[in-house]
Image (cartoon, helix red, strand yellow):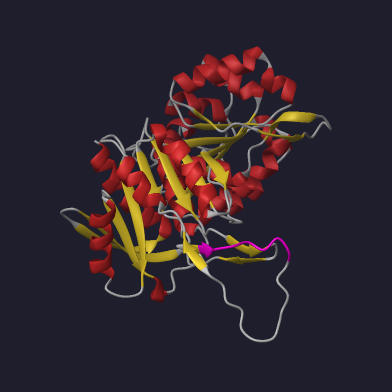
Amino acid sequence: MIKGRRIVLGITGSIAAYKAIEVMRELQKRGALVKVALTPSAKEFVSPLTLGVLSGSKVYGEVIPRSSKEIEHTELSSWGELLLIAPATANTIAKIACGIADTPVCELALCMGKGIIAPAMNYRMYENPITQENLKKLSSLGWEVVEPAVGELACGEYGKGKLAPVEDIVDSATYWFYPKLLKGKKVVITAGPTREYIDPVRFISNPSSGKMGFALAKVAAAMGGEVFLITGKSPLRTPYKVKRVDVETVEEMREAVLREVENADLFVSAAAVGDYRPKEFSKEKIKKEKGELLLPLVKTPDILKEVAQKKGKELVVVGFAAETEKIKDNALKKLKEKGLDLIVANDVKKGIFGSSETEVLIVGKDFEKEVKGSKEEAAYAILKEAAKLLS
């Protein structure tokens, strides 16, 4: 969604200004076109020359240009589709809230009317009622505020005021361009593998990385949903604006799912849930002995089927089918047997586990659609179909 988008990066006079270079580079990696505007004090922290070379464009750093016939703030505001101010000082936030336009960044804010602000300052400045009132005012006018992190600040104090992680800031820019088809909807998504322990050091699991479920959670949040991600063990970063619940076993996942779907609008079961668990758990490590080890297994609860059978008319349920043969036939069978609204089938023999690319078949009661590309692209296609059912 961000590829080819035109973003103006506004940088203000915060010690965190050096992080703006990372923000710019990550935006560029994702395919965005970036131009930069600086406040006069920002030049004390980052060089216009550095920013100009890295962005490949002239840096807008003067309200009254000395060597240009262009009216730069109007030219740049017409070019840009989004103004992203990172970092944003309390001073600049206050000026934008009051309509003051005495720096290039403030001029652009007045011209463009809204955008994204990532505050960075001392925690007492951030928590000051005046700053909070200014942020509340800007939010009401359509500005997105990426809340600062809690941590050690440049002044040596500790509190909320540290610039948000670069990934969250860049995600917020990516989210900006998604249609808000899930606005006001609660979305519950499962991801990753489950583990069923044999003894304290061994378990039964599968090679799921969780990438598909995490992509679904990220895109659902980008589409305006209130997203709860229930995931098995995964090292993946929690997507921006997503609430994460970590579980291990099928029973833990079941409890979390049944708790969250009570008032949900959409449930997407993308986790690779184990079908069996050991009949008995050994409290001590099983020693290696001569001969074979027989491990009796029993079925685990079918979370997807249980949710689908209990759901009311308001809840849309989407399942996944990881198959090795008869992909479409098996998907249709699962769709009907479990009473799902949609099912997403894929061929695991094509090496989808751990990959950032995928190939899926989305199947509904009266349609089917093939999608091939990144997991985020597949997630968007899946959620668009789910949003149609919600509406």
Residue 134 forms part of the magenta stretch = no
Question: Residue 1 versus residue 56: which sits nearer the camera?
Answer: 1
Q: Quadrant of residue 146?
A: top right
User: Between 198 and 12, which is closer to the camera in this rendering?
Assistant: 198
Residue drawn at the location 57% of the way across and 49% of the way down: 247
Residue 19 visible in the snapshot = yes
Relative to 271, 25 lies left or right: right
Query: Is 281 part of what is drawn in magenta?
Result: yes
User: Residue 5 in the image: x percent, y percent?
Assistant: 41, 47
Number of callouts: 0
Q: From this view, report whether residue 5 is shown above or below residue 113.
A: below
Residue closer to the observer: 159 or 194: 194
Span highlighted in magenta in the image: 277-284
Where's the C terminus, which quadrant?
Answer: top left
Residue 210, percent from left and from top:
50, 58
Q: Is residue 273 left or right of residue 340?
A: right
Q: Residue at x 47, y 68 (%)?
A: 353
Q: Position of residue 1 (x, y in %)?
A: 39, 49
Q: Nearer the viewer, residue 34 or 84?
A: 84
Query: How far across and how far down the image is residue 352, in percent?
Result: 43, 69
Task: Please say if 14 is above or below 281.
Answer: above
The majority secondary structure of the magenta stretch comes to loop
Q: Is residue 34 visible?
A: no
Note whether 256 is above or below 326 in the view shown: above
- The answer to whether residue 41 is left or right of residue 317 is right
